[in-house]
Image (cartoon, helix red, strand yellow):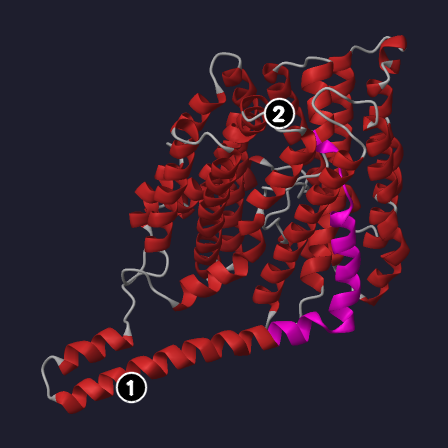
Amino acid sequence: TTALGGGGGGGGGAAPLAEELARYREAINPEVLAIMSVYFVQGILGLSSLATTFFMKDELGLSPAEVAALSGIASIPWVIKPLYGFISDTLPLFGYKRRSYLFLSGIVGSLAWLALGTVVHTTTETILMRTIASLAIAVSDVVVDSVVVERSRDSQSRAGTLQSLCWGSRYFGAGVTAYSSGQLLETMSPRSVFLITAAFPLLVTLFSNFFNEERAVVPSKAAATTSAKSDSDDALLAQETKTEGEDSLVEKFWVQAKEVWAAATLPSVLNPMLFVLAWQATPNASSGFFYFLTNQIKLRPEFLGRAQVATSLASLFGVWLYQTKLKDVPIKKVLLWCTLLSVPLGLTQLLLINGLNRGLGIPDTWFVLGDDVVLAALGEIAFMPLLVISAKVCPVGVEGTLFATLMSLFNASGILSQELGALLTAKLGVTESNFDNLGLVILICNLSSLLPLFVINNLDSVNFENDGTDGGEIQPDSVEPIDDRSPL
């Protein structure tokens, strides 16, 4: 993808800008608009984020630990994304490998949000529908990523333009909903927000027919057609063809799995990834802190929406800062300093919990906003090198599958972070009304973020030559669903 901070060039900026705009205009066609719509939906589904948390907190009456634990469960579909890619690549649905999966994922996602807005009343039903909604968007994400990869093979210029349009659409969707997610909750219930959210996945269904895809030929179906015109020997041949096709599918899966396992267990891959996964898996106190913000100091949804806008902008600033100023700095050094800085910055939340910020003349709202913005930018600066590491360790030949697998493990580590935070919150007795030990939870979570430094030397086995180029070519795989860098 095009580096966000690509900076450069001296005078005569008008001509390059005109050429850039012309390239974007040439790139946009019905299929590209369809691709952009899927990424836009991924971003705009953030409309439901605050509504979901308030629904679980207020309507279901769940504790901070329960919200954290159950939110981790709903993110599980993002852990097995490589499986969706394998299925869509090898098993055409209604004759298509891309269109049909996108069509159905939009419908399934819409129905899940519709159920949350109408017939869901229990915790079990809520988690089931949230997981289904998460599955729908994860499937569409894998499928549209496959299309982007296919369309990006023509040229590097086209690849950069297409990726920029895709991620621009996603960030635009996220920006549109960041503020409105809180504003809507001031005037309507979380269920009403879910009903509005249910309309957006249907855009994926609507635009699925715009994807240029030839109908896949299924050997067994062709054999069955032949058998209808011939004798029983041909029918037997058709059955053998079908069996061989099924055997080859299973064989292909196991061959690919063995190749990925062999690559993943190489010391040059395993050692640095142990650091990456450890960095992501440390517990976080976001759920308990959210309850403190809303129940103790009474922050309104509208303010929380504004805080989301600020943290989104801060994250983009973090990406820009890394791409323009830090991508040539040794990755080990960037991660070391980001980790060391994150601890004292994260511990500033203790000032808010104990009301010390007011003694300094800083209102609660300004303190929360400033804290979120700084931590979001720092978290994004640390996240970029982790993606570079994940890409660098992938051997040639299995790089696509292994990178997708590593990103799934990254998401799994994020779920573990949620669950560890939930366990810690429950054990220390932090509830919706008791925040006596919330400071201790925050202290433990922040200090635990230093633990990955014990294995940071594992990064020495990675060849980081040409970091700058590769760092600008990599973009996050999932967005989503797991972010332990901000309490909101």
Visible residue check, residue 385: yes
Q: Is residue 60 magenta?
A: no
Residue nearest the viewer, comparing 460 with 49 = 49
Q: Which residues are magenta?
A: 259-287
**Nearer mark to the viewer, of 1 and 2:** 1
Amino acid type of the residue that numbered disc 2 sits on in the rendered structure = Val
Determine whether the residue tagged by mark 2 lies in a helix, strand or loop.
Answer: helix
Determine whether the residue tagged by mark 1 lies in a helix, strand or loop.
Answer: helix
User: Which corner quadrant of the image does residue 30 belong to?
Assistant: top left
Percent of width and height locating residue 23: 46, 45
Quadrant of the image for the C terminus?
Answer: top right
Please state if 386 lies on the left or on the right of 60 as rendered. right
In the figure, 163 relative to 342: above or below? below
Q: Which residue is mark 2?
A: 309
At x 37%, y 38%, the residue is: 111
> Do the CB atoms of the residues marked 1 and 2 lie less than 8 Å apart?
no
Percent of width and height locating residue 422: 71, 38
In the figure, 394 relative to 277: above or below? below
Visible residue check, residue 469: no
User: Which corner quadrant of the image does residue 289 belong to?
Assistant: top right
Percent of width and height locating residue 104: 34, 49
Sort mark 1 into few (<14), some (14-19) or many (20+) by Cα contacts within 10 Å: some
Which label belongs to residue 240?
1
At x 42%, y 28%, the residue is: 117
Alpha carbons under labels 1 and 2: distance apart? 59 Å
In the figure, 325 relative to 198: above or below? below
Q: Main secondary structure of the magenta part?
A: helix
Residue nearest the viewer, comparing 389 with 410 = 410
Residue nearest the viewer, comparing 423 with 218 = 423
